[in-house]
Each structure stands twice: as structure tokens, then as C-alpha cells.
Amino acid sequence: MNTPRMVPRLLLVTAALLASPGCSYLLGDDGLFPDTSQDYRKAREMPELEVPEDTSREALQQAYPVPEVAMGSGLGGEFEVPRPSPLSATATQDAVRIQSLGEESWALVSIGPGQLWPQVRAFLASAGIAVVRADAEAGLIETGWIELEGQPMASRFRFRIEQGVQRGSSELHVLQMHQAGDTSQWPATSNDLGQEGEMLRSVAQYVANSADSSPVSMMADRAMSSQGRIALREGPGGDRYLDLGLPFDRAWASVGKALEDARFEITDRDRSAGRYYVRYLGSEAEEESGWFASLFGGDDEDPLLGRDLLLSLREEGGSQVSIRLEAQTEPALQEREERELLSLLQGNIN
């Protein structure tokens, strides 16, 4: 014999309330769920709790203590507001760029290592290329042997992801090996630079097409910081310089390109001494807005325009280079001017 199914009382009550007109039965002042979000406005300060003299007051504490406000006086003297630095070339660069130095090529990607890592893994998965080793902390991915069309022997590839020079950027390096001879160790350079370049371009194109929606690998992100490999530092006695984490050969080439992007004219160079002789031309924005500045007497014209400067690169051991800037003739650069020019150069080095 079938018996009627029992319905819980709470469900019946809820159904009846929902069928009633309006929502006041639920959310009104007299409803089941009254709005208490404004009750704090009605709160009144209560007198401090009194306890007997022989009782400890350690357990009595403010629930939301108000911190003390330190009243200090302003700094004395006069200060000059620094000029805003022009936009760097890296602010408008492509998401992915192929760069070369000699026979070495790599992809410069404008996302952090933690985002680039899963993108490379996704490319290999979509291409059906097996991964035999992946080390997120070292930024290394190694593939199995691949039979490439039109090639006499199989190849395998190693992808190395490194932190880029600029904050929030990455570098992708590809190494290729033939299935011939000693395959127990990776070669210093690719056996076939053509295959290396083709693989690098294929991965770079995949990353460029999907960089906006890339996930993040927390392990790779922790292992490879996104802080960049260049910083403006100040040594003892006010010695200001750029600290660049690149070997000298690449640092020399990168600084030469950055000088052009930062609107410096290179008048001479001495690579053996690590020196660039340059002239500061100013930003394009300053030249285009000159007519507007003239309405106000031209007081905002950059005093550094046309100055002849000396840029020096010095190896500091390992893959570290320091970059210093000074005036070729008197007067010497002021602290603010030196800092502005170094910051401008810093934003253009890749």
C-alpha cells in the first residue's frame, strides 16, 4: 500500500512564504531576515567596564583599537618637483619578439615566466610532441625524439624559460639535438640552427595568439621571479648606476639599441673600453609640443637637450654589468638629471 510522502514542515512554510505577495515576509523590518546592515549607526558608546580592585584587567581589550597618530612637522627647505620621465619603448612593444645576437636567438615575451611556462606546455600538447622532462624550478622542458618531415634523422628540443630583463617579461630559448653521435648530453649550440629557428618561431606565434588568456604556473612563478634583471642602484658616496644581469656581449648590444629607443644619438663608441659617446635628443613628445610650451614662455624645456654624455659599461663578474652616465663637459650632471636619464635608459633595455 502506497502512503502519501511526508513533506518537511520547513519546506511547507518556505513555500507558503514565497507564494505570498511581496518580499516583506522575508526581508522587511518584521520579516524572517531583517536588514541589520545599518544597525551600527544606532550604537552608543558604553561606559568602561568596572572590575573589582583585586581582579586583573589583562583580559579587557579594545575589539577595534584606534592607532595613535604621530604628529610630525614637514621637512624644511625648498624642493624641486622632478620632470616626468618619457614613456619607454617597452611600453608599446609587441607581446612577442624574436631577438638575435650572433648565432644565438631567443623570444622576448611580455608576460612573466609563470604565464609563459603553461603556454609552452600547451603548445607541445597541441602539436602532439611528447615531453620527457619538465623542471619548473629550473625553467626547463625537454621533448622526446621527433621525426620531422624531410629530415634524415630524428630531433629533440629543449626549451629554457628565463626571467626577462624588464619586470614582468620572459625569455624563451630553444636548443635542438640530432639523433646521432653522443646523445647523453645536450650540445652547447643546436646541431641544426634552421630547425631551432623554426621551432622558436612556431612557439612564439602560438604564445602571441594566446598570451591574453594564459594561465599561471605558481611553481614556475615562484622559481623565476618577475622582478626583472635590471635595477637602478646607489652606492657609497652617491654613486648611481644601473645594475644589469646580462653578460657583457649582450649588454653592449642591448644598451646600444636602448640608446636609440630612448632618443640618444650615438656619436662614437669604444667597445674595448665599454664606452658610448652620446648626445641626448629628448623625447618626440617634447618636440611636438614645443609650440604649446612656447605659449607659456618655454619654461618647461628640458635643460638636458643637446648635452654630450659618456655612458660606461663595466663587467662586475659573472653575468653582471654596471652602467654609469656622466657629462662629457662641464657642468656635471645634477643628481636629479642623472637619475632621470638612467631611469629612461633602464626602461628601454631588453
Image: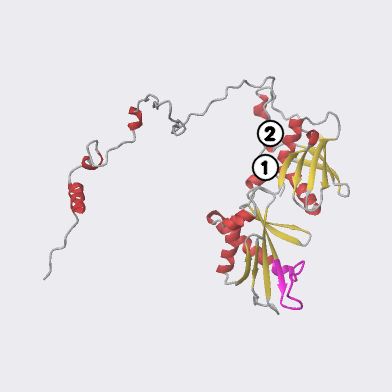
User: Where residue 333 sits in the image (x, y, percent)?
Assistant: 80, 31
The colour style of the image is: secondary structure
Question: What residue is disc 2 on?
Answer: 286
| Amino acid carrying mark 1 in the image | Ser
State the predominant SS element of the stretch in magenta. loop
- Secondary structure, mark 2, is helix
| Amino acid carrying mark 2 in the image | Glu
Query: Residue drawn 73% across and 31% down?
Result: 336
Residue 171 image-quadrant placement = bottom right
User: Where residue 346 sits in the image (x, y, percent)?
Assistant: 72, 43
Is 81 a magenta residue?
no
Q: Please, is residue 147 above or below residue 215 in the view?
A: below
Q: Residue furthest front?
A: 54
Q: In the drawing, what numbered circle is on residue 88?
A: 1
Of residue 249 and residue 98, the one placed in the foreground of this image is 249
User: Where residue 106 sits in the image (x, y, percent)?
Assistant: 70, 59
Residue 205 image-quadrant placement = bottom right
